[in-house]
Amino acid sequence: MTTPRSGLLLALGRFNAAHPWDHNAHYHRWIMRQLPRGFGPALDVGCGTGDLARLLATRARAVDGIDRDEAIVARARELTPPDAPVTYGVTDALGELPAPSYDVITCVAALHHLPFTEALTHFRRHLAPGGTLVVVGLWSARTPVDHLLGAAAIPLNAATGWLKNKGRTACPPASMTAPVRPATMGFAEIVHEARRVLPGARLRRRLFWRYTLVWHQE
């Protein structure tokens, strides 16, 4: 039997499916505000169709975008102008990276696909002195505050989808059709482990089931 609450959630689910929007791209401009006006080589981990890599290229000397999905990397190459200083590769984020070090490393909605501690340690090792690591990740709801934020995000998610699509039914962006895996770490666990690996890291819980992490290499 469908209850009023479950009926509402089903209706919201149908509405959101008809008015999709990219929750990760929502944070791209915020990411750019964490970075210098100009910098050397940059790495975008889990680059998808390359939206953030191309944005980084407006300030970076060169950008490496890496992803394990061959089809989505091929699409990123198609979407990137030939004169843009961006190179894409089908690469394991924990394997050998295209360059030994980077002034900027970004990782959006990809860290929960990787061994958390190992990945942060790997990124720290490849971040140049004075470099910046920026992560936008997913957290799993564990606490009353988590569930409250999740509940608050549901109507905002629907309203944002409506506004971004100007009320029209739309198809999901290509970056939203790649296989995904749910997050398993709670925010408190993420903060504890991140600060153990990256002392002084700044983490914040965000709307739309995301958190942010910023860390500067000494």
Image: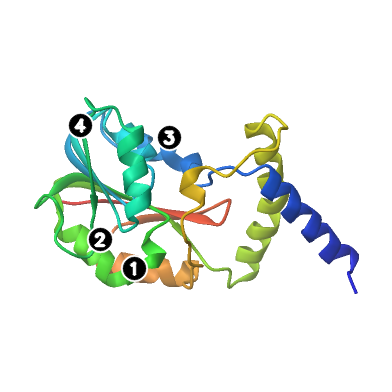
Local secondary structure at mark 1: loop
**Residue placed under numbered mark 1 in the picture:** 114
Q: Earlier in the sequence, mark 3 or mark 2?
A: 3
Figure disc tally: 4
| Residue 77 at x, y percent in the picture | 30, 38
Asked if the residues shown at circle 2 and circle 1 are in contact, with their CB atoms under 8 angstroms apart, the answer is yes
The amino acid type, in three-letter code, at marker 2 is Ala
Local secondary structure at mark 4: loop
In this rendering, would 210 be left or right of 119? Answer: right
Mark 4 to mark 2 CA distance (whole Å) = 20 Å
Q: Earlier in the sequence, mark 4 or mark 2?
A: 4
In-front residue for pair 139/171 = 171
Mark 2 to mark 1 CA distance (whole Å) = 8 Å
Disc 3 residue crowd, few under 14, some 14–19, many 20+, Cα 10 Å? few
Residue 34 visible in the picture: no
Q: Earlier in the sequence, mark 2 or mark 1?
A: 2
Local secondary structure at mark 3: helix
Identity of the residue drawn at 65% across and 65% down: 147
The amino acid type, in three-letter code, at marker 4 is Pro
Q: Earlier in the sequence, mark 4 or mark 1?
A: 4
**Residue placed under numbered mark 2 in the picture:** 93
Disc 4 residue crowd, few under 14, some 14–19, many 20+, Cα 10 Å? some
